């Protein structure tokens, strides 16, 4: 749709239809083209200044996602995406630049789009920039990557609230509607188990720790986590303000 060049026309149509809010995303590569650049790209930052200004002019509230499956390709090539813990720092640096730049223009934020989609596919590279080997245990890769993304999300919440305590920073879960075939308890248990990959992320982002539900799911999948000193405190301090 070439939103980059036609956003004014698109937003005008939304305003005409009575829209009062619009969820959009900031492209990580527009701000840091390689992901690990020293300085942000001013042209990219200016585009979002203009976008948010136009939204406010039309009475439309921005709801902004920081990462919508847009891992810079350079980070995937050089670091293997979120398989490398260093990508946490790259993401938080990017988020802080956005928070500082738009702290007077954006109140509602989301860290990762559909963060739990990582567990719902056998092709997780577009979620986290993973280039995994065929002989690797994909489940184990996913659990460790999830830990690093959850840390990145929590640190983003912590840093965002330092920059503007009025920010509302939420998560974003892909919620696959799941119903038991009948009210038979067996069917209901199966339906609940289908939702465990979603509960896993929601529990950590909302409660701030790996709950018994998370741990039982981890055990069921024969997974284990490498958790460093301080990680648990970060998760506890960086809980989201809302669920989306």
Image: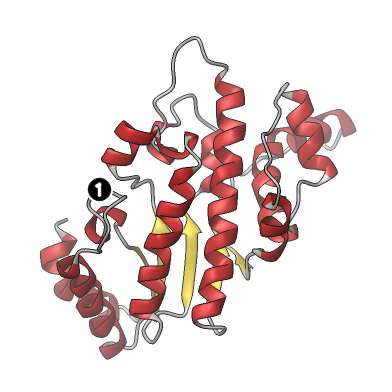
The vertical placement of 142 against 149, above or below, is above
Q: Quadrant of residue 179?
A: top right
Q: Position of residue 37 (x, y in %)?
A: 26, 54
Could one spot residue 182 in this view of the protein?
no
User: Residue at the location (15% across, 74% down)?
Assistant: 9
Could one spot residue 132 in this view of the protein?
yes
Count of all numbered marks drawn on residues in the image: 1
Q: State the residue lying farthest toward the right.
A: 185
Q: State the residue lying farthest toward the top.
A: 135
Left or right: residue 199 compared with residue 139: right
Residue at mark 1: 34
**Which is nearer the eye, 59 or 45?**
45
User: Residue at the location (62% across, 33% down)?
Assistant: 143
Q: Position of residue 66 (x, y in %)?
A: 40, 60
Left or right: residue 184 compared with residue 35: right
Q: Which color mode does the image show?
A: secondary structure
Q: Residues within 10 Å of mark 1 (few under 14, many from 20)?
A: some
**Quadrant in which the C terminus is drawn:** bottom right
Q: Secondary structure at mark 1?
A: loop
**Which is nearer the eye, 11 or 125?**
125
Q: Position of residue 62 (x, y in %)?
A: 38, 76
Left or right: residue 236 compared with residue 28: right
Q: Quadrant of residue 146?
A: top right
Q: State the residue lying farthest toward the left.
A: 5
Q: Position of residue 38 (x, y in %)?
A: 27, 58
């Amino acid at each position: 749709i070439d939103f980059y060049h036609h956003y004014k026309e698109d937003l005008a149509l939304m305003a005409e239809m009575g829209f009062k809010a619009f969820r959009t995303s900031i492209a990580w590569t527009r701000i840091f083209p390689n992901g690990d650049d020293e300085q942000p790209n001013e042209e990219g930052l200016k585009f979002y200044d203009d976008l948010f200004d136009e939204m406010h002019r039309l009475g439309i509230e921005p709801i902004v996602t920081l990462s919508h499956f847009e891992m810079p390709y350079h980070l995937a090539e050089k670091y293997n995406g979120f398989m490398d813990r260093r990508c946490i720092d790259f993401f938080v640096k990017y988020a802080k630049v956005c928070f500082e730049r738009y702290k007077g223009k954006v109140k509602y934020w989301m860290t990762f789009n559909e963060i739990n989609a990582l567990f719902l596919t056998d092709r997780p590279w577009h979620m986290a920039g993973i280039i995994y080997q065929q002989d690797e245990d994909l489940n184990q890769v996913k659990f460790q990557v999830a830990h690093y993304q959850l840390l990145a999300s929590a640190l983003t919440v912590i840093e965002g609230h330092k920059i503007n305590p009025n920010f509302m920073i939420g998560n974003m879960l892909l919620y696959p509607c799941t119903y038991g075939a009948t009210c038979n308890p067996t069917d209901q248990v199966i339906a609940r188990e289908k939702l465990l990959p979603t509960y896993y992320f929601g529990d950590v982002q909302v409660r701030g720790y790996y709950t018994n539900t998370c741990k039982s799911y981890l055990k069921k999948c024969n997974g284990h986590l490498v958790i460093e000193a301080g990680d648990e405190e970060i998760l506890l301090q960086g809980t989201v303000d809302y669920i989306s």
